[in-house]
Amino acid sequence: MLLADMLAHPDFNKRMQAVAAPFRKKAGIPFSVHQAGIVVLDVEAAAASLEVQGFGPFMIAAATLPRWTERDAEGRFRGKMGVAYHDGVELELLEPGEGSDFYRRYVDPEGRPVIQHIGFLTHAVDEWAERLSKMGCPAWVRGRIGVGPLSVDFAYMDSIHETGTILEFIGYRFAGIPARPAASIIRTVAWLQMKTGKRCIDFG
């Protein structure tokens, strides 16, 4: 799915909620689509282009993930991402990164932003990953992002053959307590990045 095609729809949120709807109903997934995961060659360039069009601003960060398990094999991944909100949906820009071709294989030959996956928020990532695995959609990648007291666990499911896209379950915790992403904080940090000209926070 090309991001431009989805954004051109008069009701972006409704269009995103319709993605993989038959399978989501079949699997009993009760969550609304929280995130559109978008693969781009260059996060900062893509963010700047979208901001000129009136989307964003994007908070941009780079990090090496403390956990990256792909096809049950432990690995190491370093990447850069940009986050903003549009019509109630999180837009997550993702570069191909280093250590895996998981994102790289979805890079568009013409460099256009591609929606690689849709994400759902849940405090039961493991349970949902197991549930979909039993339905024939095994976990492709299990990972964790850690920034101070904040940790984000996620599971990308190999669901393309069933849904036409990758499904992701995402769980936030702050100091070990289940939490939700704070859109207002993300917007504030993004605004400060734009004002200061330091567009990327590198967490190492």
Image (cartoon, rainbow, N blue to C red):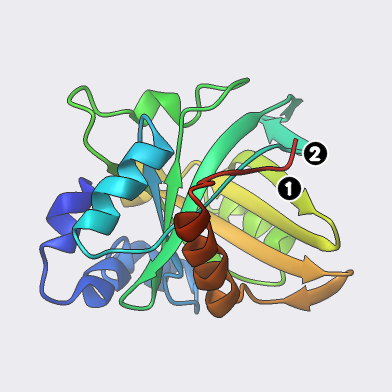
Q: Residue at x 65, y 30 (%)?
A: 78
Q: Residue furthest right?
A: 175
For mark 1, does the 10 Å Cα neighbourhood hold few (<14), some (14 to 19), or many (20 or more) residues? some
69 or 3, nearer to the observer = 3
> Residue 49's spot in the image, x, y percent?
25, 47
**Residue 55 vertical position relative to residue 198 in the rendered view, above or below:** below
Amino acid identity at mark 2:
Pro
Instruction: Report the residue marked by disc 1.
Output: 144
Horizontal side of 80 relative to 127 (left or right) equals: left
Left or right relative to 182: residue 3: left
Image vertical order of residue 9 relative to residue 96, above or below: below
Q: CA distance from mark 1 to mark 2?
A: 6 Å
Residue 183 lies, in percent from the top left, at 53, 75
Vertical placement of residue 158 versus 153, above or below: above
Which numbered dot is residue 128? none
Quarter of the figure with the C terminus? top right
Q: Horizontal and vertical percent for residue 85?
A: 40, 69
Q: Earlier in the sequence, mark 1 or mark 2?
A: 2
Residue 115 in view of the camera: no
Q: Position of residue 199 (x, y in %)?
A: 50, 46
Q: Nearer the viewer, residue 33 or 151?
A: 151
Residue located beneath label 2 in the image: 66
Q: Are marks 1 and 2 in contact (CB under 8 Å)?
A: yes
Outermost residue toward the front in this view:
196
Whether residue 92 is visible = yes
Crowd class of label 2 (few under 14; some 14 to 19; many from 20; radius 10 Å): some
Identified at 42% across, 70% down, the residue is: 33
